Image (cartoon, grey):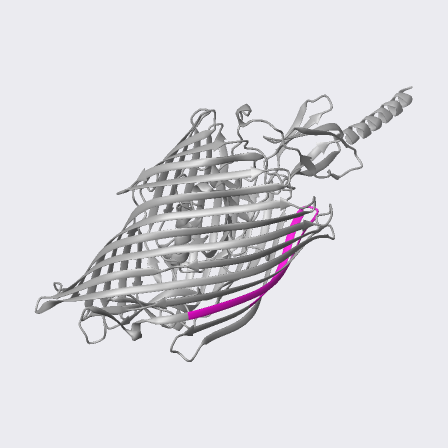
């Protein structure tokens, strides 16, 4: 009897264990959400998994590619429910069985709901900073501090980004190339600074900080910053009106209008932004010139500079859906900007340790215009439901930069009568750019293959005239005047494959770029020509041992080409004691970078990176008598090791923080310049906090600190920045009022030192950065349907054009 009872209990336990095992089997469920009209992915959609009795089991949010996943779900019958503001709710039954390990449902198409904005009581918001694989995303549209600012102001507050003098930008210590809507701008230095100053922050949706770009990006730049402009997602006629006022030492203002009209097949959109700003520049430089056996000479210059700018930017585009598989579009965008400048410079010369023995007083009145217009035509065709697609972009752009300075120099010496010099310095720069790009996407071997071909041609014509007033007429000095023609052709192709093997996502790419450049200075019978071709491999892998942890490894190879003016051998007059000269022997720099990372719950991210750049660039001061000539030079190499920690967390229901810390070791080998190798170890600290003060009010605080550091031949001093903003939603959330203060303690100061064999240079440049701004944003119409992003293929070239400040 006991034996029969034991057998019965054994069978009961075995059967129960089998049933328990079957019931506890877990299945991974995934899918994607797509706009039914634009066929674009829908990030931030809410996905809920319910029991058949409508009890909530788990929720998820789609990522930037519109995908979602539930990692571990027990077998059974469920209901999948998906919702997105402005769209009809969607639900479908889902059955998970023990025989399944992974279940991927077909893409879900959400249909727009025809509802009025006033009927919506809840508005989804994104955190200002989000961490995604391979990049950090700044949701500028959600930032209080971005109101009335420019793109350059936003980048100054971006994590791990440093904005230096004359528009030099770095990300995690790496030189950056700036993209707009996925297209390289090809601007650098003063040109890039001018463009980013023109680009109003209220027209920006996101900024992507990419430290390890893949092969789909052009190879220029060790890192990429991609600025995504705001796209309206609305049906019918709707828009946003922006108006703002502010003040620093002088008042400023801004205004903007964004409009969109959309039907089932047609989308017409556009925007116009205007900024008027006045900004002071207070600069000081001290040079000590020494030669063996001679008395050292000291030259101290102080400058007070006021610049007034009228900035106009516009965009107008049209997308038309020819069929369910084919969309065509055109885009016209441009900037028309003017700048008036008045400056006074006092320069004192003396032997070291003595009183000034001569003085030069300089008055400068200058005018400049920075005008550009770009045209893009685009076609996108999807072959079938598997994802095979073809894109074609054709682009043309033209830049026009006339510039005129009227200068009066008064030379004073205690033992001689004063002399006055009157100069006229007209200059101009015209740039024509054209590009054609073809891209193809093909599902392959369970992954995705991307391929692309691109050709880009640029022609720039620069002229500079040095004219001195003599006998009531201006006479041109041919030794200080020039006309320079530069052409550049870059032909490229790439392959990029991405896939997944169990818990490992991977991406491997190879890019080939062939470059031909030619620079001709009028009167010089020796044109400067360079022809070179390079392969740029890239690789990234992400390992996810669990839904909480993520390990990553990436490698990339990149190039930095000289900007258009750097290869010009002519001299450009800046002041009686300062010239700029190009270097026709400048070569492109090549960089290799490796980065490993770890992420926990997408809240804590750690990364360790190493970058080595051969033939890196630096601006080298060269002393000739009492004149300092700045010339770009290649130096042997720079090596960079960085360790980053970033923490994003909703600490309480009302407090969100994004805090980062970076330690950097930088080593510069300067042997070919006759200078000793230098190195520095420095750190960078950043925190951004958003606090909700009730349902309608938010407070934002950002603070950064950057200590002393060595970059190339220069030693830079520390600086810090604190910014504060307050936002209040009004008119049933249709409008936002934003009050912000930038550089609260007025501590953004660019200070640097250079120590050479015969020259010691100390510079202090203070650009006015403390402003109080008040901005109103008002949205009208039906803020609903997502629309296709339009991009220009010439945004890549604009980064290297010298548009001035």
Q: Is residue 371 above or below residue 739?
A: below
**Image-based side of 628 in relation to 487, left or right:** left
| Residue 167 position in % (x across, y down) | 39, 55
Give the total number of marks visible in the rendering: 0
Residue 468 lies in the magenta stretch: no
| Residue 205 position in % (x across, y down) | 50, 42
At 38% from the left edge and 57% from the top edge, which residue is drawn?
190
Taking the view exactly as shown, the residue that stands out farthest to the bottom is: 525
Toward the viewer: 607 or 533?
A: 533
Asked where in the image residue 20 lies, by quadrant, the reply is: top right
**Image-based side of 95 in relation to 538, left or right:** right
| Residue 229 position in % (x across, y down) | 50, 45
**Image-based side of 210 in relation to 403, left or right:** right
Q: Is residue 600 above or below residue 425?
A: above
Residue 487 lies in the magenta stretch: yes
Placement of the C terminus among the 4 image quadrants: bottom left
Residue 219 in sight:
no
Toward the viewer: 481 or 353?
A: 481
Q: Main secondary structure of the magenta part?
A: strand
Q: Is residue 719 above or below residue 736?
A: below
| Residue 390 position in % (x across, y down) | 67, 53
Query: What range is drawn magenta here?
Result: 485-514
Toward the viewer: 271 or 205?
A: 271
**Image-based side of 743 in relation to 326, left or right:** left
Taking the view exactly as shown, the residue that stands out farthest to the front is: 472
Taking the view exactly as shown, the residue that stands out farthest to the top is: 1
At 48% from the left edge and 75% from the top edge, which residue is drawn?
529
At 56% from the left edge and 42% from the top edge, which residue is drawn?
268
Placement of the N terminus among the 4 image quadrants: top right
């Amino acid at each position: 009897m006991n034996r029969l009872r034991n057998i019965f209990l054994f069978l009961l336990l075995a059967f129960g264990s089998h049933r328990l095992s079957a019931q506890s089997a877990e299945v991974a469920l995934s899918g994607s959400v797509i706009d039914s009209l634009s066929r674009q992915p829908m990030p931030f959609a809410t996905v809920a998994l319910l029991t058949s009795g409508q009890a909530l089991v788990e929720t998820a949010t789609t990522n930037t590619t519109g995908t979602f996943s539930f990692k571990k779900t027990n077998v059974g019958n469920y209901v999948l429910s998906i919702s997105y503001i402005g769209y009809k709710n969607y639900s479908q039954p889902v059955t998970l069985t023990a025989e399944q390990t992974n279940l991927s449902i077909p893409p879900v198409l959400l249909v727009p709901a025809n509802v009025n904005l006033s009927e919506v009581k809840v508005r989804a918001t994104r955190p200002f900073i989000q961490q995604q694989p391979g990049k950090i995303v700044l949701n500028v549209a959600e930032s209080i501090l971005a109101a009335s600012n420019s793109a350059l102001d936003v980048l100054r507050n971006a994590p791990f980004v440093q904005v230096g003098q004359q528009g030099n930008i770095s990300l995690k210590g790496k030189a950056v190339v700036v993209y707009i809507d996925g297209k390289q701008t090809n601007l650098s230095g003063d040109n890039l600074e001018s463009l980013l100053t023109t680009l109003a922050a209220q027209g920006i949706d996101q900024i992507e900080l990419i430290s390890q770009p893949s092969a789909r990006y052009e190879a220029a730049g060790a890192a990429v910053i991609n600025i995504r402009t705001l796209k309206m997602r609305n049906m019918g006629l709707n828009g946003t009106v922006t108006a703002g006022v502010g003040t620093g030492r002088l008042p400023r203002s801004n205004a903007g209008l964004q409009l969109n009209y959309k039907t089932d097949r047609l989308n017409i959109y556009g925007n116009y932004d205007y900024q008027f700003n006045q900004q002071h520049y207070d600069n000081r430089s001290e040079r000590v010139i020494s030669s063996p056996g001679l008395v050292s000479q000291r030259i101290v210059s102080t400058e007070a500079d006021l610049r007034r700018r009228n900035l106009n930017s516009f965009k107008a585009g049209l997308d038309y859906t020819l069929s369910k598989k084919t969309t065509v579009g055109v885009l016209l965008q441009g900037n028309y900007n003017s700048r008036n400048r008045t400056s006074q410079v006092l320069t004192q010369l003396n032997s070291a340790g003595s009183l000034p023995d001569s003085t030069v007083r300089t008055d400068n009145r200058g005018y400049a215009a920075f005008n550009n217009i770009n045209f893009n035509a685009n076609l996108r065709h999807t072959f079938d439901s598997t994802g095979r697609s073809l894109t074609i972009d054709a682009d043309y752009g033209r830049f026009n930069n006339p510039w005129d300075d009227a200068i009066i120099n008064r030379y004073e010496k205690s033992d001689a009568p004063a002399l006055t010099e009157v100069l006229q310095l007209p200059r101009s720069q015209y740039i024509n750019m054209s590009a054609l790009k073809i891209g193809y996407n093909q599902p392959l071997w369970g992954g995705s293959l991307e391929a692309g071909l691109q050709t880009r041609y640029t022609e720039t014509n620069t002229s500079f005239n040095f004219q001195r007033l003599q006998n009531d007429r201006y006479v041109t000095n041919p030794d200080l005047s020039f006309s320079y023609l530069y052409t550049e052709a870059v032909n490229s192709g790439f392959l990029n494959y991405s896939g997944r093997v169990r818990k490992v996502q991977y991406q491997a790419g190879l890019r080939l770029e062939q470059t031909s450049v030619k620079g001709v200075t009028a009167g010089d019978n020796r044109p400067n020509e360079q022809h070179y071709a390079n392969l740029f491999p890239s690789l990234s892998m992400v390992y996810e041992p669990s839904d909480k942890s993520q390990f990553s490894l990436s490698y990339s190879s990149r190039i930095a080409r000289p900007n258009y003016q750097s290869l010009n051998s002519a001299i450009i007059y800046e002041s009686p004691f300062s010239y700029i000269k190009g270097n026709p022997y400048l070569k492109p720099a090549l960089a290799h970078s490796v980065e490993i990372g770890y992420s926990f719950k997408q809240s804590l991210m750690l990364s360790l990176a190493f970058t080595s750049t051969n033939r890196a660039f630096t601006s080298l001061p060269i002393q000739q008598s009492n004149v300092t000539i700045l010339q770009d030079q290649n130096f042997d190499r720079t090596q960079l090791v960085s360790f980053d920690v970033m923490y994003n967390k909703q600490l309480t229901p009302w407090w969100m923080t994004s805090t980062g810390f970076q330690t950097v070791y930088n080593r510069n080998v300067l042997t070919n310049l006759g200078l000793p190798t230098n190195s520095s170890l420095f750190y960078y600290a950043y925190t951004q906090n958003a606090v909700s003060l009730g349902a309608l009010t938010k407070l934002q605080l950002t603070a950064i600190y950057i200590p002393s550091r060595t970059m190339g031949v220069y030693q830079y001093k520390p600086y810090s920045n604190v910014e504060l903003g307050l936002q209040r939603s009004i008119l049933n959330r249709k409008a936002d009022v934003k009050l912000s203060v930038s550089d609260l303690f007025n501590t953004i100061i660019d200070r640097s030192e250079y120590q050479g064999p015969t020259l010691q240079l100390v510079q202090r440049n203070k650009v006015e950065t403390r402003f109080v701004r008040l901005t109103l944003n008002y949205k009208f119409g039906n803020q609903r349907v997502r629309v296709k992003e339009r991009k220009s293929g010439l945004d890549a070239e604009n980064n290297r054009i010298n548009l001035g400040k």
